[in-house]
Image (cartoon, rainbow, N blue to C red):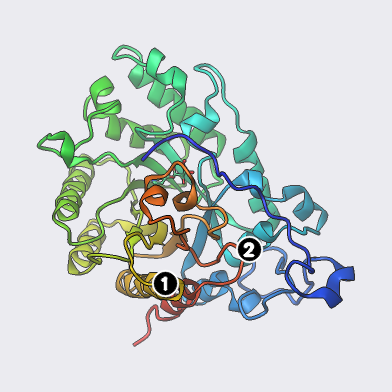
Amino acid sequence: MTNTGKSQLTRRQFGWAALGVGAAGALGLGWAAVEEPRWRRKRQYDAAVQPGVTGANSLEAHAAARGLLYGAAVDPGLLDVEGVAKGHSTDAYTHAVAAQTGILVPENAMKWQALRPTADSFDFTQADRLMRFARLTGKRVRGHNLCWHEALPGWFWGTANKENARRLLSDHIRMVAGYFRGQLQSWDVVNEAIWPQDGREDGLRTRPWLELIGPEYIELAFRAAAEADPQTKLVYNDYGIETEQPEEVQKRAQVLKLLHRLKDRGVPIHAVGVQSHLAAAGQQPGAGLQSFIREVGAMGLEVYITEMDVNCRGLKQGPAGRDAAVAEVYGNYLDLVLAEPNVPMVLTWGITSAHCWTNQLDQRIQRWADFARQRPLPFDDDFNPTPAFWRLRGALDGRNRE
Ligand code: XIL
């Protein structure tokens, strides 16, 4: 995975004409005023388009009806926050996010690279933008992330050394988690710390944090986060632990051992994030993941599905077949994980394929995908629901059903 690159796609502006609803053109794409439903904490922002998938038909509403949270990763730069503040927006991305989600996570805006232009300054502009949008639309927000080996700013590599790294990490966490204190549902405190390929017995990734600080950097990060924001849930987040492929089975086992070590030492941790970047081709998640979720449940931890998307790399089918295969993975995967009572939340990594990392030109998945544009999310490039939308919504409905 690379740590560079912004979405190559420009923001899309949609009006009624673009959506083929010419007669309503004079009205603009405004927020429909409807009776306040109980599941909506603030105002109702549904566009008066696609009534089959908004309001009580949205992912947010279906999740809430089952006591679950659905959400998505967003790019605050694409959100029409000013429009929403004025009570009117013509932006389709903004509508989709407002109509479908109960919780947001910044795709990049809370990473070191975004927040730390220099070693001694912080820039919260984009993160603040997201928080403002969330307040205006009544969304919760989760933080991502405080400690990762990627998305570190250029200056970091010339500045961090064994003498100052502890201070650098704990100061960053104190400052950032302190800044958002009391406002976030959860924080991904440490991201992707397990990497068995580095050859250590404990499975820990070596560069850069372990080499700079030692294995105790993980505990240090969680303790600093707990001090800075005692209310929020603290999460260890990782990927490549979902399927039965040998390297994923091995990685999952190492993650479990890490969690046991942290719990044994009384480290404040509340949940595990299973990223869930899945592929429609090849081996699918199954009993191994189910036991993992149960075992971490027995340790008193929740499991969040934090970054779900399903790529179609290597599939031979045409467009409809690919969509169906992606949707099938959504359904099967979410049926599996949502059957576990300690899984209260599902986020997709984006909401529309118009803006998603698997279609970013610098991503490996995009380059290897026999040049097909990926459709890995509940909405397509034109903001129509994909087959995955219906399977995702159906899986939310299936929670707790006999
Ligand atoms: C990705 C973003 O989606 C991209 O825009 C960025 O260029 C690289 O990072 N696991 C994570 C996320 O925890 O932060 C990554 O996000 C995707 C993989």
The crowding category of the residue bearing disc 2, from other C-alpha atoms within 10 Å (few below 14, some 14 to 19, many at least 20), is many
**Taking 354 as reference, is 52 above or below it?**
below
Report helix, strand or loop for mark 1.
loop
Farthest right residue? 26
Inspect the image, locate mark 1, and give the three-letter code of the amino acid beneath it: Gly
**Taking 299 as reference, is 326 above or below it?**
below
Residue 105 visible? The answer is: yes
Q: Are marks 2 and 1 in contact (CB under 8 Å)?
A: no
> Which of 297 and 237 lies nearest the eye of the viewer?
237
Quadrant of res 207: top left
Across and down, in percent, residue 13 comes to 73, 56
What residue is rendered at 52% in x and 72% in y?
386
Which residue is disc 2 drawn over?
96
Which residue is disc 1 drawn over?
318
The crowding category of the residue bearing disc 1, from other C-alpha atoms within 10 Å (few below 14, some 14 to 19, many at least 20), is few
Across and down, in percent, residue 329 comes to 35, 70
On-image quarter of the C terminus? bottom left
User: Residue 150 shows which numbered tag?
Assistant: none
What residue is rendered at 42% in x and 28% in y?
152
